[in-house]
Amino acid sequence: MGFALSDMQVSSGAFGSLAPIPKRHTGEGENVSPPLAWSDPPAGAKAFAVICHDPDAPLVKPGAYGYVHWVLYNLDGSLASVDPATPVGTAGVNDSGKAGYTGPMPPPGHGRHHYYFWVLALDRQLDLPPGLSMWEFLAKAEAHVIGMNRIVGTYERG
């Protein structure tokens, strides 16, 4: 399967679709990941992964754009959610070069940014090592993605 939306639903107890992300989950607050939950995963889902990407960030590099805030993989197929600052799964590297989550913090005056929290369902557990970038993870996982969907939150610095 290619990267197309599936019937899986993604939600957050911290914000609604296209609603502001609470300061707690941003670089101006506690900088902890928001809670995420998913339902109706595709049949045969054995693992999940989470990616948070800000396509509005004014960063362009060869083959990429925006800013990756979170890469989390090796999530067991029995899970249906992750808590704030979750210890489960394996942390990849975000675009700040650090493992784990780094919250929204767009440039002052840059306007409202959109943060896509993707949940990917995989047909098998890949048991990948820590520290993969989003692109490294996707290169290894693409053939195993059987469904995906997202919730989009927003944030704007005053």
Image (cartoon, rainbow, N blue to C red):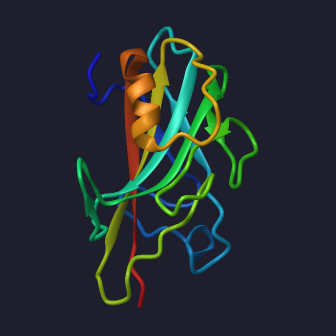
Spot occupied by residue 11 in the image (x, y as percentages of width and height): 49, 45
- Quadrant placement of the N terminus: top left
Asked if 24 appears above or below 158 in the picture, the reply is: above
Spot occupied by residue 116 in the image (x, y as percentages of width and height): 38, 52
Q: Quadrant of residue 29?
A: bottom right
Give the side of residue 141 with respect to residue 127, left or right.
left
Spot occupied by residue 147 in the image (x, y as percentages of width and height): 38, 23
Which residue does the image show at 46% across and 58% down from the upper left? 95
Residue found farthest to the right: 87
- Quadrant placement of the C terminus: bottom left
Which residue does the image show at 59% across and 56% down from the upper left? 101
Give the side of residue 83 with respect to residue 156, left or right.
right
Which residue does the image show at 76% across and 44% down from the upper left? 87
Asked if 17 appears above or below 71 in the picture, the reply is: below
| Nearest the eye: 95 or 39 | 95
Spot occupied by residue 10 in the image (x, y as percentages of width and height): 46, 40
Asked if 48 appears above or below 96 in the picture, the reply is: above
Residue found farthest to the front: 62
Which residue does the image show at 40% across and 20% down from the upper left? 145
Q: Quadrant of residue 88?
A: top right
Asked if 19 appears above or below 129 in the picture, the reply is: below
Q: Looking at the image, can residue 9 be seen?
A: no
Give the side of residue 57 with respect to residue 153, left or right.
left
